[in-house]
Amino acid sequence: MVLSPIVAFALIGLGSGGLIAGIGLGVVLSYRGGGVINLSAGVLAMLSGFCYWALDTGYFGITFPTGWAITLTIVFALVVGVVFEFGVVRPLRGQPPLAKLTATLGFFVSAQAAVVLGFGEEARPQPPILPSGIVSILGYTVPVSSFWIAGIVLAVTLLFVGAFRWSRFGLGTRAAAENEAYATLYGLSPNGLSLANTLLMSLAMGLVGLLGASIAEVDSSTLPLMIVPALAAATFGSLNSFTVTYIAGMLIGMAESVLIFFSSQSWFPTNGIGNPLPGVQELMIFVVLVVAMFFRAGKIPGRGDIVERRLPPAPRPRAPLKAAMKWVPLCAFLMWALPFGFREGLITSLIAAVSLLSLVVITGFVGQLSIVQLALAGVAGFTVSHFFINFGIGFPWAAIIGVLLATVVGLISGFPALRVRGVSLVVLTLAAAVAIENFGFTNSTWGASVTGSLVPAPSLFGFNFGPNASFHGIDGAEPSPLFGWFCLVVLTVIALWVCNLRRSRLGQEMLAVRANERAAAASGVNVRNVKLIGFAIAAAIAGVSGVLLAYSYGSITADSYDTLVAISLIAFIYICGITTVPGAIQGGLIYTGGLLAYAILDWFGLQGNWLNLLVGFLVIASLVLRPEGGATYLFYRSKRPASEVTS
Amino acid sequence: MSAVLSTSGVSVSFGAVRALSEVDLEVREGQLVGLIGPNGAGKTTFIDAVTGFVPARGDIRLRDRDISGLPPHRRARLGLGRTWQTIELFDDLSVRENLAVAAQRSTLASGLGEVFLGLWHGEEQVAEDALDLLDLRHDADRMPSELPQGRRKLVGVARALAARPRLLLLDEPAAGLDSHESAELGERLRRVVDAGLPALLVDHDMSLVLGICDYVYVLDFGKLIARGTPEEVRNDPEVRAAYLGGSTADMASTADMASTDMLVTMPGSEATER
């Protein structure tokens, strides 16, 4: 019977479906409780997973019996929930949804760094807590744990549904979500309700972390990135319905599992070297999300928060040429004079600054937060690599074609933004980034195998100016300062150009669109075109950074343009100032792997992940204290004379 | 005199609610036309319909050109300038930049040309003129959030003027201004119209509308109930019934008070007007 394997694989998928649904419940709880699109729900689950693994295996020196380990993990989940409430939800109360979402991104980056620092990168085979037996269905073996996970998450779902429908707590949460001010007037405490919801959410995530053990190893990326299908499920539930989220999550998990079965079939498309096409699951989730957004986006309820704030201001740049004349020669000198490790850090910083400038344009100017930018950089990077491998075309044509291709893909990614706004766009671009990475970059035809895809050094008329060029720095080591200078020139040109953009009419129109789309249209601004041009420009800049990154690595893999890196990039730029050019440049300097990171590694022996650990806290602190960002503050604070404070 | 704006049979429905039905209105060259009515009468909806922000049925013509199918920015570029009851400035841009956005007529080509090749246009003189006309030069480099409500209203008007419109649609520009500011605004509007820019003025301030307009339309529950010169409208029994049921004398005396709009503002009606 043809159907029987499909049914069996669908049943196996109940397990991951349960995890997706569980994380989806966390997303819904966070949104209903505090209006937070919680991108770190999966991270919370991962933390509990590691906690349980450590307690159960005696990683910290004491081995606990399973019962105790579970209990302590639940306590740990609650503690993390309290931290999340007071560290992320509470400080950001009343901030716009985008700021709240960014704060959860910050938490994401910090928690992930903490886990990597504490446990290392490798996956941990977690001892399962569910019965590990198998049953035979239609001739296929299905693990019993799949049914357990599906059942337990279903029970939790029904519990939530009941609590929200019939308890005073549920009523209060619903009232506060409608209108915080009125809820307060009726004697409900928004803070108390928010805390209760967060604790409930972290409990559920703790449970997911424990359950995840039975079907997967614990590592620092699987559960965190399960947020993407979970968001798709929650979007089907309009971020409001537990039941719909559960059903959608289960269906996504089952569909993924069936796709795994399909990929083992002979008719399944292959990637050219005989392996089944990778990333089809991620592509499916992206499509599912697009469908969910199309049908449900308008139905996601807004929240009646008391306070509302927006993106930080984007001041007009002052004398950018003067600033460039001061900093560029200094940087050029350092490129030659610094020892090789610092030089490498500086080059990484310059390249990161270029990719951050792409975020300045699309988020700072046009007001659309997009996670897909680094994936666009990857499109350009892999184009450069494959034009050399497949056609023997090198610099500059491969680079130009790569940037153009990134621009085209970026333009396409801009079309949903005409319909989908704000946090929904973030969710959509996150799914797109994951899909491009898995479907495009891990595909050895278009992307790279794990061993990497070769990128030739850039050279013009036989003159090599790549990292391996013969001209060396003062210490006589690679990477060549020539390549550093090349990156510096590119960054300088783009930075000055972005300054020019801010002052131009197009830039003013972008900010007008960012501020008020209706009023912009009434002033004759073609909102659609301005957004699309913004996406195209940002994509082109991202493409340039991708090309530089490819040249600097010499060989690239899918990890070079990883979605998790994209998320940390956004965290860094938020700290420094997402609306200005100095913000992007400072963000590049403090970026993981950049100059500052190498300096603390060299001087204090601390890894770049310590920076990431700090970044999450800094993101939240800067969102609350200096939403315009550190660099923006430093560069523009003197602009306002004291007299302007009056009036 | 030819009609700058003429609408016929303009109707707007929100679900089952008929917000506007069959509105025929005309603004002629050189005219300042008033549109009054109690809150919820559909005045703002009418401006939204004309400028393309709500879907409407009926015929809307700007200088004999049918604009009813065009998106808002196209209508704006054809010469429809408007202000908003809720001001709606670009909070991220300085006052001067707010005006500059409206003043520029950038196309895709000119926009990209400017950014890529540095083809600057001289700072728009029109924007500067609008600043002067509304006495905003002092505030030109400030951010809108730093200005008090009254001045932000003026920036909204100046922004509409900076676009060099052929017709100005003003949605309650005097709301939130004191009586002195309101009278001053009236004077300035009159000067703008006399200089050749026709305008449609929607406001609650009866003394302002009846005092400076050439012609007045009265809207109630989405229907036009009267039209005529200020004098005719003032004496129209149906208009008096719509407003408080008061006598002409009442209207004349309340019109002098600064808080006229308080009398015609019914609680809770603000939301329905949007």
Image (cartoon, grey):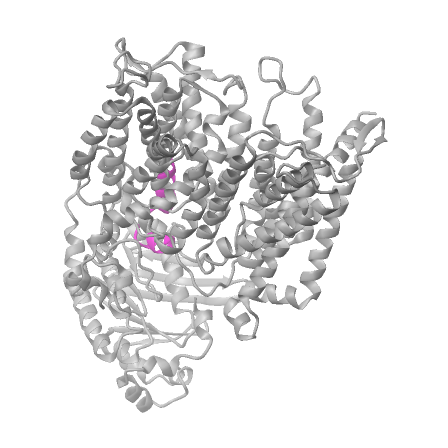
Q: Is residue A291 visible?
A: no
Residue A192 vs A367, above or below: the answer is below
Residue A421 at x, y = what percent? 46, 48
Say left or right for A380 vs B132.
right
Residue B11 vs A220, above or below: the answer is below
Q: In the image, what residue occupies the spot 59% across and 43% down?
A: A47
Tell me which segment is drawn in magenta.
Answer: A516-536
Task: Give the quadrant of the C terminus of chain B.
Answer: bottom left
Say left or right for B163 vs A547.
left
Residue A263 at x, y = what percent? 67, 23
Which SS does the magenta portion mostly show?
A: helix
Q: Is residue A567 visible?
A: yes
Residue A298 vs A248, above or below: the answer is below
Q: In the image, what residue occupies the spot 72% across and 56% down?
A: A159
Residue A84 at x, y = what percent? 53, 52
Residue A156 at x, y = what percent? 72, 52
Task: Give the quadrant of the N terminus of chain B.
Answer: bottom left
Q: In the image, what residue occupies the spot 53% across and 53% down?
A: A83
Nearest the eye: A412 or A315: A315
- Magenta-drawn stretch contains A438: no
Q: Which quarter of the figure has residue B68?
A: bottom left
Nearest the eye: A581 or A485: A485
Residue A161 vs A533, above or below: the answer is below
